[in-house]
Amino acid sequence: VYISYLVCELFFGYDTIFKAEKLFILLFWVGPSFFLKTYRVPRVSSYIKAIKPCIFNCLSFSIIYIFYIFLGFNSSYIISFHLVFLSIVSTFQLISCFLRYNFFYEYRLQGKNISQALLFGNLTSSEINRLNNDSLKYGYHFIETISKSENYLKKIKIITNERRIDFIFLYESNKFI
């Protein structure tokens, strides 16, 4: 964000001295980024779902930045400066989100960055096969599928003593453990 701001100042011929206003702009970016968790790479199946938090972050930042200008801060710059700045920041953010998602997606397809998981629930063999085939896309390796709810706690104890388990998924939400 700060570099984009400096680039815009240089492009429009403004003085690039350090001002505290620039730190506020950086904080306007950091706030929505932490709230929307754009620093994470989501384990989803589509690019649209992966960049959705980044799109919301860009929109949130743009709204905050526009209010900042309307309050009289940074209003000495012409409107095209602000439009170019918002365009550069949004473009850079969306491209970086896309590239991060693509990198980790390909990385997970190679069998790296995989979380070990258990799956509980009554599943048909076709559902189990579909989940196992798609599990690498999401970065999971399903160690075992347990269908009887009476065995959930026993199986968890046995398997966690033998192997490292990162996640436990319950397929049926209406069942109690």
Image: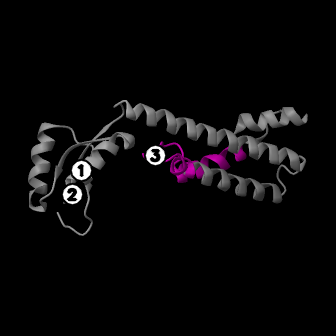
Which corner quadrant of the image does residue 135 belong to?
A: top left
The first of marks 2 and 3 along the sequence is: 3
SS at mark 2 in the image: loop
> For this view, does 69 lie left or right of residue 24?
right
Judged left or right of residue 59, residue 66 is right
Q: Quadrant of residue 162?
A: top left
Q: Residue at x 91, y 34 (%)?
A: 13
For the point 9% across and 61% down, the residue is: 150
Secondary structure at numbered mark 1: helix
Looking at the image, residue 9 lies above or below residue 117: above
* Residue tagged 2: 123
Q: Are marks 2 and 1 in contact (CB under 8 Å)?
A: yes
Q: Which residue is mark 1?
A: 128
Q: Residue furthest front?
A: 126
The location of residue 95, given as percent across then percent down, is 63, 38
Residue 9: x percent and y percent? 84, 36
Q: CA distance from mark 2 to mark 3?
A: 25 Å
Give the image quarter of residue 22. top right
Q: Is residue 12 above or below residue 150?
A: above
Q: Position of residue 167 (x, y in %)?
A: 27, 47
Task: Name the front one of labels 3 and 1.
Answer: 1
> Marks 2 and 1, Cα distance to the nearest angstrom?
6 Å
Q: Earlier in the sequence, mark 3 or mark 1?
A: 3
Q: Amino acid at mark 2?
A: Leu
What is the magenta segment's predominant secondary structure?
helix
Q: Amino acid at mark 3?
A: Pro
User: As rendered, which of 39 and 17 lies closer to the eye?
Assistant: 39
Reading the image, the residue beneath label 3 is 42
Q: Is residue 56 left or right of residue 91?
A: left
Which quarter of the rendered picture does the N terminus lie within? top right
Q: Nearer the viewer, mark 2 or mark 3?
A: 2
Residue plotted at (24% across, 52% down): 126
